[in-house]
Amino acid sequence: MEFEGKLIVVTAPSGAGKTTIVKHLLQKFDFIDFSVSATTREKRAHEIEGMDYFFITTEKFKQLIADNAFAEYEMVYQDQYYGTLMSEIDRIWNSGKHIIFDIDVQGALTLKRKFKERCLTIFIKPPSKELLIKRLIQRKTESPEALKKRIDKASHELSFESLFDYVLVNDLLEISCKEAELVTQRFLNQ
């Protein structure tokens, strides 16, 4: 029987804990691999090219859009693009693994429309909007202007939770990670 890869798409407003949960699932399951997104945003000091993101210029990103190289892409902030390259999906499926994504809400919905039942979307939600804002402030990774943009966007993204297959409230991280494991396992065993 030929391998039919599936997609586990984890999304959330910034600061809700999606990256931590995705990293946990990658450690737990050796039959899934991480889809590295492309972005035009500046690389942060701790990030590694090709591991965290493919950092590319806006011009190159727009050329890849014109070449239909993306499974999904969005201009998440003004002149700041993020996207999933089809070549990244092919690379992982060709290795015989399922794919896990850590992407924004709009990108997640695009992948769900494109891959339908082969795609599980998990929306990570903070226990409260106030806690989400506190987490974003405590990160100290952005300027006040960038932080305000993230908070505004996060507030907007919370209104989309009903469009996802599964909503996980990230209150206690250990419990949230276990819940994400169970949901992922159940989907992959279908």
Image (cartoon, rainbow, N blue to C red):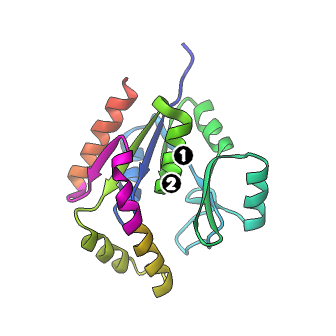
**Amino acid carrying mark 1 in the image:** Thr
Examine the rendering and report whether any part of residue 106 can be seen: yes
The residue positioned 73% from the left and 67% from the top of the image is: 58
Say left or right for 148 vs 4: left
Spot the residue most to the top: 1
Q: Which residue is mark 2?
A: 106
The residue positioned 32% from the left and 75% from the top of the image is: 133
Say left or right for 47 vs 134: right
Place of residue 102 in the rendered image (x, y in percent of width and height, measured from the top left): 47, 53
Queried whether the magenta region covers residue 82, the answer comes back as no
**Amino acid carrying mark 2 in the image:** Gln
Q: Which residue is mark 1?
A: 110
Q: How many marks?
A: 2
How busy is the neighbourhood of tag 1: few (under 14 within 10 Å), some, or many (20 plus)?
some
The residue positioned 77% from the left and 61% from the top of the image is: 60
Quarter of the image for the N terminus: give it: top right
Stretch of the chain drawn in magenta: 155-173
| Vertical order, 165 against 10 (above or below) | above
Residue placed most toward the observer, 109 or 190: 109
